Image (spheres, helix red, strand yellow):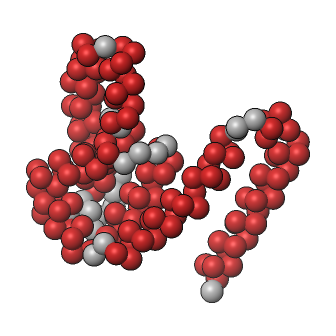
Amino acid sequence: MKSSRVKGIFGVTALIAVIIGCVMFPEYASDNSEILSIFLYLPGFFVLIGLFEAWVSKDLVVRHLGVQSGLMGSVYSFILGCLIPGPLYLAFPIAGTLLRKGIGKFNVVLFLGAWSSFKIAEEIFELHFLGARFLVLRVLLTVPFVILVAFIVSKVCFDEK
């Protein structure tokens, strides 16, 4: 009960802050500002997150993305991060859901790194405007760093339970 009350208070406070911000800074609210686009994305996205939590079993996630999934689990996490469209702020609720479902710590950080660095739609634009040579060079230089960061963060930042 207390948790839902705190969430409600937080939601109302955030809504009031947005309204006050739109009144105080109308030049940002009149165009297609970021905050308005965020509010357009979020409702549908949270419905999809809820469906994912309800329909995808924990056993399936653990089997394919858990600690014991090995190299293939890491490959699946990387590909999943590359394929899902949307801005990076939507990746964190998905990562939280995957953590609750039992994904490995390395794989969740790899998923976030892939999402932030290698979205397929953005790679197509990069290929078109900057060329194949640039794209291949950037991918070859970025992939090892994403893997290294995933390894370091998974070892340093997660508490062992």
Quadrant holding the N terminus: bottom right
Instruction: Tell me which corner region of the image, top left, top right, bottom left or bottom right, holds residue 26.
Output: top right
Residue 14's x, y, as percent? 73, 58
Image height of 66 relative to 157, above or below? below
Q: Residue furthest bottom?
A: 1
Residue drawn at (24%, 46%) of the image: 79
Image height of 134 relative to 120, above or below? above
As drawn, is 72 to the left or to the right of 102?
left
Residue drawn at (45%, 65%) of the image: 49
As drawn, is 155 to the left or to the right of 42?
left
Quadrant holding the C terminus: bottom left
Q: Taking the image as drawn, is residue 141 in sight?
A: no
Q: Taking the image as drawn, is residue 27 in sight?
A: yes
Observer-nearest of 126 and 6: 126
Instruction: Tell me which corner region of the image, top left, top right, bottom left or bottom right, holds residue 145.
Output: top left
Residue 54's x, y, as percent? 38, 77
